Amino acid sequence: MISKSFNLYKLLPWVVTCILLSPIIAIVLSAFVIDDSGSFQHLLDTVLLTYISNTLLLILCVVLFSICFAMPCAWFVACCEFPTRRTLQWVLMLPLAMPPYIIAIVYTDLLDFSGPVQRTLRQLFGWQSANDYYFPDIRTLLGASVILALALFPYLYLLLRGAFLAQSGGLFQAARSLGLSPLRAFWRVSIPLSRSAMAVGISLIAMETLGDFATVNYFAVSTLTTAIYDTWLELGSLTTAAKISSVMLLVLVILISLENYSRRKQKVYQRNGSVSTDIRFVLTGWKKWGALTFTWLLISLSLFIPIAVLLYYAVHYFAESLNDDLINYTINSLWLAFLVAILALAVALVVNFYQRLNPGLGAKSAVRLSSLGYAVPGTVVAIGVLIPLTNIDLWLNDLFISWGLSSLGLVLSGSLFILVLGYLVRFSAIAVGSVDSSLVQVSPSLDLASRTLGHGPAKTIWRVNLPLIKKGLLTAFILVFIEAMKELPAALLLRPFNFETLATYVYQFVSDEMIEYAALPALMIIVLGLIPFIVVNNMLEKRS
Amino acid sequence: MSALDIQNLSCSYQKTTVLEALNLTLNDNEIVCLLGESGCGKTTLLRAVAGLQTELSGKITIQQKTLNDHKTFMPPELRKIGLIFQDYALFPHLNVFDNVAFSLAKMSKTEKQQRVQEVLTLVQLADMAERFPHQLSGGQQQRIAIARALAYQPDLMLLDEPFSNLDQHVRFQLIHEIRQLFKQRKMSALFVTHSKEEGFAFADRIALMQAGKIVQIDTAQKLYRQPNTVYVANFMGQANYINVEVVDKYSYQTCFGLLGSNSVIEQQAGQQLRLLLRPEHIAITPDLNGEAVVKQVDFQGALQQITVDFSGQEFIVRHSNHSSECLQFNIGDKVVLSVLNHDFVTFEH
């Protein structure tokens, strides 16, 4: 009585998973199998080790700066009471909407020799040339680390704040009653208890740093990402790019293993109630002012100052900036992001409901595998989809020519198809995760109730599950939309000839150091990211 | 024709056997309780009948309609079975009316309204149709869940720990109400619980399960008074055991002296056995020359539960507190214990 058509439906999730995994497989294969006539060996003998050490050093610095930024903020907001705390709670998340390369160009503009800061200093002290004084150069690895940390620290902040809030306030009070000062209690109780959140946050930041292309390229810091980009676009060697990509995957595997290793002893601590107002440590006097200065200065540096500078340029160059190009590219970005978000949602529904209807190890691994792409940097994903698609294109063309037809051209690798696929590989995980987390909140007995009341699996999904995860679906859609709007490296490598998104358009001005023209489209990216971000945040707050 | 017939049902996953060649038959209009500790397989059995457990061998039929055998597997939506859950499983996005009408998609609007009104009246919540599940108490939610299942007019009702999330005083009131309702509607039901008190109150027969098997199935009284194994005896209530030796066809030699049996003893003279003594089968009287000593006294309202040391063994006995002048036992009191006449139950060593 089991219908046979079910088998087809069981195949679909695996097809989806295989497509999403193909770039990673392609890269691993090309690293071991395909010969690139020694180019990679040459790189290895010359610059590759520098690139690797630069990459690792950059990751280390960004992580350290992020901890310095995020940990105090998380503690102030979760465990202390001081003016504006409630506002800060969500404002501190907003820098996530800032693409780091936009922060980079703003600070370069401000801090360069000809920028307003140095100019003012020179006027104040009567210096004539750069030889008269020392001013730190922002276009270094250290400068890039600070900029990246300013944009990425909210990941860690969010996770730490969540961890601090989830810890029972009683523990902190117990520590204080045993004679510890608030700071010591924080150090000896709160920090060890949030080790797991710390590990997740750090690895997220490390992965984002590993994948960053625009900031390091702008600051001329050579890392693995820039190496891949240069090898493909300048040397035109896809296989060598793939081999460097596999080095990057190796770094990624190390990062993920480190994360798992640091969490190995972490037990699940039962939440026994949250920090209530009376348990919060009330800051007064210089402590209050210290907390206020630290948090708001950080927000100003990562959000207000860049936006103010961009606004200044956008207003002054409004007429020149607002042209058909800007409008066209905004529309390009919007519908591309929309399409990718819809498709990612479809992927999430297929994979998640497959798991829901067939609980077990097989379905779980489908969910896991389909989510691997997110950890992989955009440049690597781009190389990964280029390899199979160019091969398919070549094969198709050969086939057509052998049939006596004219050649097709690059139908897959030269069209929007490849861009959409690249985005999907990278962002499906967000949708899968978001749908999964709202679906697990739907009690399985609801499905069983519906089944025994005469509804088959499809009808149960339609009448029971989907209505109950509506919000989760919307959240998934918006999150993918934001990421797709911001994505730069994959777009740079995969876009068809003459196709620009808002991000590539801004980046073109950034690399030409034309901040005045970059300002308006950059603001557009920020605003289009901020609005959905605030919407999602409100929705999640209401849910909890 | 039987309401449910299970033959030779086995189920195992990940190499552990959950159900082992199990047989069970429900008569029409009968409520049977599956009782047992957690992990004994009772919920798996329920899920198997509902069609939610797929890795099975054996045969399940309802009213001679085959649900499951070596070649058929009927999906749950075709089985016409009402399933009631511990967490009520009301759809949170639908109000009471839509919840109850969930299975009535093919009916006309007036028919639907009529049916919903009818079952809501049965569970005494006719005025709650507009409410949402979260606006109802636990007891009300469970009644709605039962109304929802009844509206579908199932051939058999399955209940999975339906009362365990409810407060003590609501629980037994609801149990009696639902039992009466099922009896009125001539509804057969299979009911899973780990609480024997719920089983006593709700079911006609109790099937006690242990490690994937039904060890004994009978009325509650029979299970309590005539358990067929020590496991059943202990599960159904407090038990004392004494070693006895068969003297002849009518008596045992025990630490209480010679005890005469009401029925013929089948075992050979001289055989050692264990005799079950429920606390109410032992009388306790104060006696300054008694050999038994009171070890512990627990006041339990209507009763005192007294632990007594006698002949190198502890006995649990009960003494009724029927009046305020009633005997109050204290620790260290000397007492005499005696066995009251009843139908003896013995187990082999």
Image: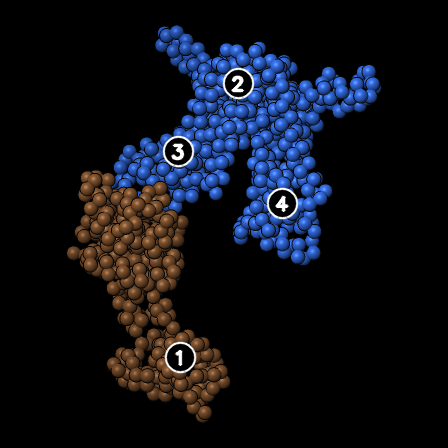
Chain colours: A blue, B brown
Q: Is residue A543 above or below residue B147?
A: above
Of residues A136 and A224, which is closer to you in this image? A136
Find residue B230 and report its image quarter. Answer: bottom left
Q: Is residue A297 above or below residue B140?
A: above
Task: Indicate which label's residue lies in the foreground, 3 or 4.
Answer: 4
Q: Residue furthest bottom?
A: B289
Q: Which mark is residue A81?
A: 4
- Return the chain for callout 3: A
Q: Earlier in the sequence, mark 3 or mark 2?
A: 3
Instruction: Give the SS element for disc 1.
Output: strand
Kindly indicate the quadrant of the structure image that contains residue A298: top right
Disc 1 marks which residue?
A: B317
x, y (%) of residue A47? 67, 21
Marks 3 and 1 sit apart, C-alpha to C-alpha, by: 62 Å
| Circle 3/circle 2 CB separation < 8 Å | no
Q: Earlier in the sequence, mark 3 or mark 4?
A: 4
Crowd class of label 4 (few under 14; some 14 to 19; many from 20; radius 10 Å): many
The tag earlier along the polypeptide, 4 or 2, is 4
User: Is disc 4 in contact with disc 1, using a CB cutoff of under 8 Å?
Assistant: no
Measure the alpha-carbon separation of dots 2 and 1: 85 Å
The residue located at (32%, 63%) in the rendering is: B172
Q: Nearer the viewer, residue A121 or B80?
A: A121
The residue to which callout 3 is attached is A349
Q: Residues within 10 Å of mark 1 (few under 14, many from 20)?
A: many
Separation of residues labelled 3 and 2 (CA atoms): 29 Å
Could you give the CA–CA distance between mark 4 and mark 2, rounded to whole angstroms? Answer: 41 Å
Disc 1: host chain: B
- In this rendering, position of residue B207 left or right of residue A42: left
The chain that hosts pointer 4 is: A
